[in-house]
Amino acid sequence: TAPTQHIYGLRVALDMIRNEGLEAIFARHEILARAIWSAVECWGTGDGKMRLNIQNEYYRSRAVTALSIGAPFGLNLRRWVEKKAGLTLGIGLGMSSPEDPNGDGFFRFGHMGHVNAQMIMGLIGTVEAGLCALDIPHGPGACEAAAKQIALAT
């Protein structure tokens, strides 16, 4: 049996890509990645332990951002945002499950595909709410820094 619904879905996705244009898609991914990087850099100031896994932005992905926050903060934050806000953060790569003790201090933000500024600002605000709720040390200004990256690009 032909996967008819998958073919229809692929047609819609390809139409969306054609309508937006590859250059615009790449630019959007760049802007959203920079917004996330700015937020993470703010969270990592002061007593915050959060840091980007790839320090040199030239080598960073524009599709996903991997972070380190220290155990058990990563696991606790992933659990909180999922249970309290319905947001699923990616687990650290190479982990066998979300409960893998080797990955307690790591998680990922995905930001490619049909993702926009509103979604990224919601992600950043939700993560910041989790950091506050769990008393995880972090620096201030993440939402504003992300908003500035998005504003600069428009």
Image: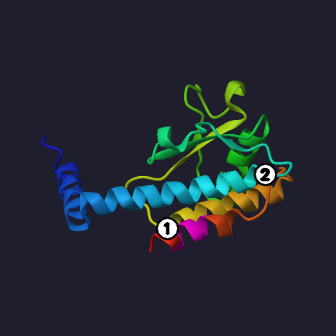
Q: Position of residue 18 (x, y in %)?
A: 19, 62
> Tag 1: residue type?
Ala
The CA span between labels 1 and 2 is 24 Å
Q: Earlier in the sequence, mark 1 or mark 2?
A: 2
Tell whether 37 sits left or right of 24: right
Q: What residue is shown at x 42% (from left), y 52% (from top)?
A: 112
SS at badge 1: helix
Q: Are marks 1 and 2 in contact (CB under 8 Å)?
A: no
Q: Residues within 10 Å of mark 2 (few under 14, many from 20)?
A: some
Q: What residue is shown at x 67% (from left), y 62% (from top)?
A: 126
Q: Position of residue 80 (x, y in %)?
A: 73, 52
Q: Is residue 150 magenta?
A: yes
User: Viewer-proximal residue, 30 or 132?
Assistant: 30
Tell whether 44 sits left or right of 95: right
User: Viewer-proximal residue, 44 or 93?
Assistant: 44
Q: What residue is shown at x 75% (from left), y 57% (from top)?
A: 130
Q: Is residue 74 magenta?
A: no
User: Viewer-proximal residue, 124 or 24?
Assistant: 24
Q: Which mark is residue 17?
A: none
Taking the view exactly as shown, the residue that stands out farthest to the left is 2
Q: Which mark is residue 45?
A: 2
Quadrant in the rendering for residue 140? bottom right
Dominant secondary structure, magenta: helix
Question: Which segment did they paint magenta?
Answer: 146-151
